[in-house]
Amino acid sequence: MTLSPKGLLALLPMIIICSYLTIGYASSYIGWYGYKKWQHRKRSASILESKERNVFLTQLRYSVEGDIKMNNLEVYMEKGFYYGKHTSKVTDTSHRENFPYQITFRNPDDKRLFIFIPEEEFSRYDSCASHSIFLKIQEFTDTLELHVLDSAGTSATIKAWK
């Protein structure tokens, strides 16, 4: 059986569509399962997301000292969580953790700001990295100190408390 040029032309869009769908599925599969995103601890992108995932605990009060204005900064405590194995829409809090709570901070108004915990502050917390503070218990009694830099080199300090 040989295909006529008209038959080949009719078959070509089907081949292109099937190839496109196959490549898209393979890319998603490799991206999700290759990186094993469900195995890494996550933090929410906002208080709203934290509440939707049912991990929000409390919002912290804060003051900003310096030349950077931040009107909508979010500093809050939430339970640590993981994504579900097959989707990021699932929230898994069942992992046994040494540090089940975390303090998260976001500035939704200006993505050009870099907010970080100074290295000399690391020893004050149960565990932390430059962008997250992890706690053994839900209590937080100290004043948290964060530093902020913008793209022009201007700096500020955020002090947050419960």
Image (spheres, rainbow, N blue to C red):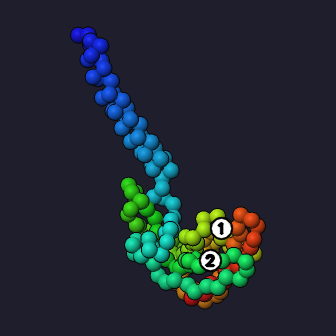
Q: Position of residue 87 (x, y in %)?
A: 39, 57
The residue carrying mark 2 is 70
On the question of residue 145 being in view, the answer is no
Q: Is residue 16 above or below residue 104?
A: above
Element assignment for label 1: loop
The residue carrying mark 1 is 113
Q: Earlier in the sequence, mark 2 or mark 1?
A: 2
Picture quadrant of residue 135: bottom right
Q: Is 159 placed left or right of 3 in the picture?
A: right
Front residue of 71/129: it is 71
Disc 2 to disc 1: CB gap under 8 Å: yes
In the displayed orientation, state which residue is furthest to the top: 2
Give amino acid for label 2: Met
* Residue ID at (47%, 47%): 31
* Residue ID at (76%, 67%): 153
Q: Is 41 placed left or right of 53 in the picture?
A: right
Picture quadrant of residue 8: top left
Of the 4 image quadrants, the one containing the N terminus is top left
* Residue ID at (62%, 77%): 70
Give amino acid for label 1: Leu
Mark 1 Cα within 10 Å, few/some/many (few <14, many 20+)? Answer: many
